[in-house]
Amino acid sequence: MNLNQLRFVSALAQHGSFTKAASACAVTQPTLSNAIALLEEELGQKLFVRTTRKVTLTAFGANLLPDIERVIAAQQALVQRAAAFLSPQKRLIRIGTSPLLDARFLNLLIEPFRTAAPETDLIFYEMNMADLNRMLDKEELDFVFGVVEPQKEQRQSTFLYREPLLYVPRGKEKRPQQQDAVVRFDEIAGETFVLVPDACGLTRTIRHLFRSHRRALNEYSGEALSYQVLEQWAALGIGAAILPKSKLTADSDGGMRIIDKLGQEVLINFEAVWNRGSGRVGHLGEFAKYLREIVPAVANGLADRPKGGQLPS
């Protein structure tokens, strides 16, 4: 087993395509495929289900993926810590992100800072929120980007962006026939919903949505370990799903915008969080100021694009 094999697994899980994963890893498709096959042989079980249309994680693969991601993150942290010791003039900002965030949109929000401060390296770690908050407490991270939630007194936060939550009906025959289809919350509240573990913030957000409407959430007894599996289970008729717009796959039939009891579109909000003291120190303070003062204008500018959005809303 080697780190490249683990990186290939992570990329394939993210992209759901050997071609796209190989391109992201800058290797040939046979190289990536063979490396994953060797790792599967070593581990004793298949990590992926391969079909002519798509590649998805097996239950075994989904169970191991968080540990694979942690090994990759640990290797990156080791390299960065060594670089920081050998080149103390190099400024690092360590950012933990929930997998629920849209990486594409986040990159657009952060790009102006990268351009203005080329001497500063932004290092990203994607993990579940419990791990991210623990690392922030231990000052192993400088900032955490995730779903808006109550914060400890010793922390500061600022709004990043929001995007629509979409309802994915169970069964392909119930999929919306047109784009931007809408559904009232009361019309779907009696459905049974498939959920992911309460680690990234999505399940907590959905449960809060139902509590705010004083409705019981009917949860499917099992749990999906990826957003892609939520979509697949909905298509199979196992249960309905609720997902951020950015997490629907490219070949998805789409979801329906949800209108709440006040007639407002249901959105999910994301924020940046940091420890109160670190936000006043040097380059960390500069980045905190950028998040507070510049990111809102950048997000609004992206929302004004014809193909942009709040995320595209």
Image (cartoon, rainbow, N blue to C red):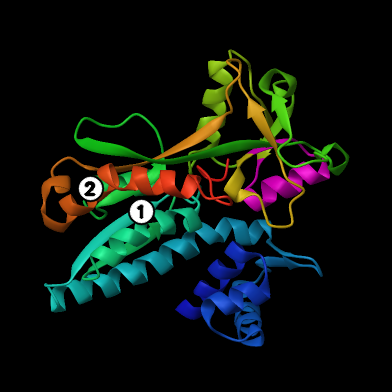
Residue at image mark 1: 96
- Residue 231 x %, y %: 71, 47
Image quarter hosting the C terminus:
top right
Residue 205 seen from this side: yes
- Residue 225 x %, y %: 61, 49
Residue at the spot 79% in from the left edge and 37% down from the top edge: 170
What is the distance, in whole Å, between disc 2 and disc 1 at their CAs? 14 Å
Residue at the spot 67% in from the left edge and 54% down from the top edge: 249
Please, which residue is most extreme toward the right here?
A: 173
- Residue 239 x %, y %: 75, 36
Residue at the spot 26% in from the left edge and 43% down from the top edge: 293
- Residue 185 x %, y %: 67, 22
Q: Is residue 115 above or below residue 312?
A: below
Find numbered disc 1 in the image and state the secondary structure of the residue it sits on.
strand
Q: Which residues are magenta?
A: 223-242
Q: Residues within 10 Å of mark 1 (few under 14, many from 20)?
A: many
Q: Does residue 233 belong to the magenta stretch?
A: yes
Please, which residue is most extreme toward the top here?
A: 214
Q: Is residue 286 left or right of residue 211?
A: left
Residue at image mark 2: 288
Disc 1 marks a residue whose amino acid type is Gly
Q: Does residue 29 belong to the magenta stretch?
A: no
Q: Is residue 160 left or right of residue 302?
A: left
Residue at the spot 32% in from the left edge and 64% down from the top edge: 123
The quarter holding residue 86 reads bottom left
Disc 2 marks a residue whose amino acid type is Ala
